[in-house]
Image (cartoon, rainbow, N blue to C red):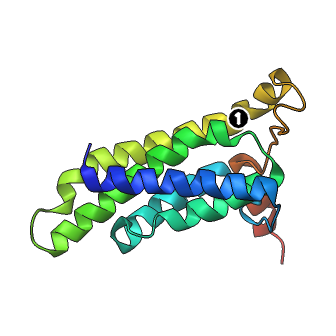
């Protein structure tokens, strides 16, 4: 693993859990909880790639606040695809930075970054599909939290398909 993307990933995870813990104790606004996980994973990847990976922590703070407000224990399920996507985005961002400095070409990292993003999105969709079964297996009030099913990618795409034909 590369140093810079790994450090950026650790900072992002600290921000995610800090936002979760703060918002768990002091509920606040919550707008990211209604976005499907697969789209969030792509957003985490893009924020990691934008600004060369230095601002990747911002969506983690906001998502931690949103999940903490809901007291949603699903953060422990969502952490793997979010981590993979953030690492891929940070790796691409830092590769772009080194390409601008003419140190190496960012396309050298292209295959591994693309593979990580595809894996993260597929895992996110699998979690979205399996979440109703997981919810039925977990007790109702687990450490003061519940696992809540949010918007799914398939449901979001169905809504979009329904809106396409309407004036």
Compared to 85, does 130 lie above or below?
A: above
Please state if 143 lies on the left or on the right of 107 as rendered.
right
Residue projecting furthest to the top: 137
What SS does tag 1 mark? Answer: helix
Q: Residue at x 81, y 25 (%)?
A: 138
Q: Position of residue 156 (x, y in %)?
A: 74, 55
Q: Position of residue 118 (x, y in %)?
A: 44, 44
> 117 or 29, which is in the foreground?
29
Q: Which residue is mark 1?
A: 129
Q: Residue at x 38, y 69 (%)?
A: 54
Q: Position of residue 56 (x, y in %)?
A: 46, 64
From where the camera sits, is residue 57 visible? yes
User: On the rendered image, what quadrant is the N terminus found in?
Assistant: top left
Q: Quadrant of residue 30?
A: bottom right
User: On the rendered image, what quadrant is the C terminus found in?
Assistant: bottom right
Please state if 109 lies on the left or on the right of 132 as rendered.
left
Q: Residue at x 24, y 61 (%)?
A: 95
Compared to 93, does 153 lie above or below?
A: above
Are there few (<14), some (14-19), or many (20+) residues within 10 Å of tag 1?
some
Compared to 132, does 51 lie above or below?
A: below
Compared to 20, does 103 lie above or below?
A: below
Residue projecting furthest to the right: 140
From where the camera sits, is residue 156 visible? no
Q: Residue at x 73, y 53 (%)?
A: 67
């Amino acid at each position: 693993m590369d140093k810079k993307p790994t450090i950026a990933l650790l900072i992002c995870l600290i921000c995610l859990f800090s936002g979760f813990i703060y918002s768990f104790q002091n509920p606040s606004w919550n707008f990211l909880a209604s976005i499907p996980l697969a789209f969030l994973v792509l957003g985490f990847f893009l924020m990691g790639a934008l600004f060369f990976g230095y601002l990747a922590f911002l969506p983690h703070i906001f998502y931690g606040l949103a999940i903490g407000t809901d007291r949603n224990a699903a953060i422990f399920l969502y952490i793997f695809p979010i981590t993979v996507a953030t690492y891929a985005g940070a790796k691409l961002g830092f590769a772009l930075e080194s390409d601008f400095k003419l140190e190496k070409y960012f396309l050298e990292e292209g295959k591994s970054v693309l593979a990580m993003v595809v894996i993260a999105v597929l895992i996110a969709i699998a979690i979205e599909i399996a979440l109703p079964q997981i919810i039925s297996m977990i007790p109702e009030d687990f450490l003061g939290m519940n696992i809540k099913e949010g918007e799914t990618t398939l449901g979001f795409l169905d809504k979009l398909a329904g809106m396409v034909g309407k004036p």
